Amino acid sequence: MSDAPALEVLQTWDALQTALGDAGAAASLLSEVHPDAQVREAADKHSQDLDAFATDLSLDTEIYAVVAGVDPDGLDADATRMLDKVLRDFRRSGVDRDEATRERLRELNRLELETSQEFARNIREGTKTVRLRPEQLDGLPGDWREQHPAGADGLVEVTTDYPDSIPVRTFAHDRDARVAVSSASLTVAWPDNDAVLRRLLELRAEHARLLGYPTWVDLDTEVKMIETAEAEAEFIARITDLAGPSAERDKQRLLERARQDRPDLADVDTADATYYSELVRREQLDVDAQEVRRYFAFEDVRRGLLDVTGRLFGLTWTPVEATTWHEDVTAYDVELAGERIGRIYLDLHPRDGKFKHAAQFTLVSGLFERALPEGVLVCNFSRGLMEHSEVVTLFHEFGHLIHHVTAGRQQWQRFSGVATEWDFVEAPSQMLEEWAWDADVLASFARDADGNPIPADLVRRMRAAHEFGKGFQARTQMFYAAVSYDLHHALPDDLTERIGELQRQYSVFAALPDTHMHCSFGHLSGYASAYYTYMWSLVIAKDLFSAFDPGDLFASEVAERYRDRILAPGGSRDAADLVEDFLGRPYTFDAYAAWLSREPGTD
Ligand SMILES: [Zn+2]
């Protein structure tokens, strides 16, 4: 036992993490959004320095000895949880191992990062090119064809980069063209990445063993809501089963449509799946994207988002003048029951040098009576009309922002904001997407230029088109999840052969011959064995949503209970306990299963 009182040690550690966290948050935000390239570069450099310092701290044996030596007697429940988490973080870094092992772990961290980067670089630089006759591109949009004229030899070059390959796989009537581009896409970085991936998997396996875990999956799942490798395997098997009937039903529809073109076709493969999905949506489900987007003017959507979420969660958004990094940014103070609880910033339009995707960034972590939380939404929407998919994205990202702000009254920075298990983090945002698919909610703000609200029938058709194929998409997702799990669980002798087995077992679409998808499956570097997380949080999101009244998504009693029991606690309790507290029962798969089996377009 060390002499220092436990509470004081923990508070000192948390204060250090708060300082590091807020400095890191500001640096990472500015590196992505500041208009001045020099500021972005400097912020990047600060980010890296802070990362390196945090790693050093996690491997500091003297600090670890102080924390591990405290007497936990007399700590309250929150502080006891805090001590457990801090010790677990230390143990997972390997600080309690002998010096040789610590050295090797440091080395492994470096090698894993380098090898991941090499894997990603080979994909980035491994773009392939296919040459096609112009008539093979019949079916593609006119502007795409104009941008892809034939060369001197009369052939059109198509690369495996998404802006080229996805339109061909989606729209080209010529099957040979689709097969050529699909096959090229599924052999990017082959054979180079076969050996790189094997090396990465070996490094991760050694890393897990050195820390005392049988496999990388065991190491990874320990800190997740799913908890164990066995549970991850069961989850993948269970979703695969649940999705079966819906996958077969919608696949049958693809096969019937494909047989109009090729009457003796026996099965649908990877080169036909995307093309016929699009065709069925267009011919049978009848949604015109042009008709949809005229209801979504940006200013209406932003106002609607604030109205809907404010009404739902009892929050008030008050515009404030604040000095920010760009004139496009709008700032709002957030009030709950008359009390200011935080501030949000919306940076929603593209500009040069800015982050290219959509995400929520933390600016300040909230701490009870010490700091109000601040969060930033960084997106890239046009200033005019929006696609409906962008509206869904906006609701999704805003869900993270609400989570960050409403969970900003914690005693410990470790638990503040979106500090929950990594496989639960997406659930609140995936749930809030439901509001962007509801006819009444949309009609409250989505209006065309003449002021007519979006018709309920159009929303119904949009949903039907969106949900078509949800079963076979789930099976494809489980194929990817199985690849991510399996390769980290037991490294096979032949990666290509094993991937082929997994595709036959999980996907409902046949593989193309002589392809090697693992070499270009970039998520293996970032997600490692945790690709299941997206589907896991979707299952939880559907379960949470089942507590709401689908006939009245504005009902505020349940929404406020959700705010207080799921969002506000942040990471101060396990996600499974929060869900049980809100639903009054442990989480189940029932709501997800019901959604999956429902025919698209029927509510
Ligand atoms: Zn998200």
Image (cartoon, rainbow, N blue to C red):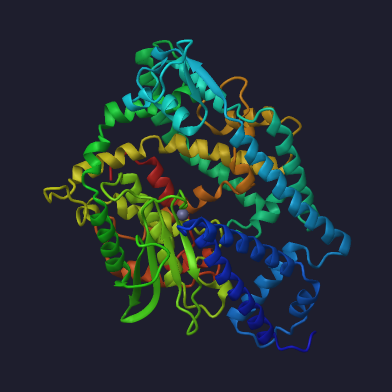
Q: Is residue 125 visible?
A: yes
Say how many tags the image has. Answer: 0
| Residue positioned 29% across, 63% down in the render | 306
Left or right, 519 with respect to 250, comes to right
* Vertical placement of residue 234 versus 221, above or below: above
- Where does the image place residue 355, in percent across and percent down from the top left? 47, 52
Furthest residue in direction left, as rendered: 450
* Residue 122 in the image, given as x and y percentages of width and height: 65, 35
Q: Is 5 situated above or below 142? A: below
Q: Quadrant of residue 389?
A: top left
Residue at 66% x, 86% y: name it.
7
Which residue is at the front of the view, 515 or 312?
Answer: 515
For the residue pair 538 and 210, the one nearer the viewer reads as: 210
Residue 358, image x, y percentages: 43, 52
Of 34 and 374, the residue lying toward us:
34
Q: Residue at x 26, y 46 (%)?
A: 385
The N terminus: image quadrant: bottom right
For residue 267, say whether it is visible.
no
| Nearer to us in this view, 40 or 495 | 40
Which residue is painted at 54% across and 50% down in the image? 533
> Residue 228 appears at what percent x and percent y?
65, 55
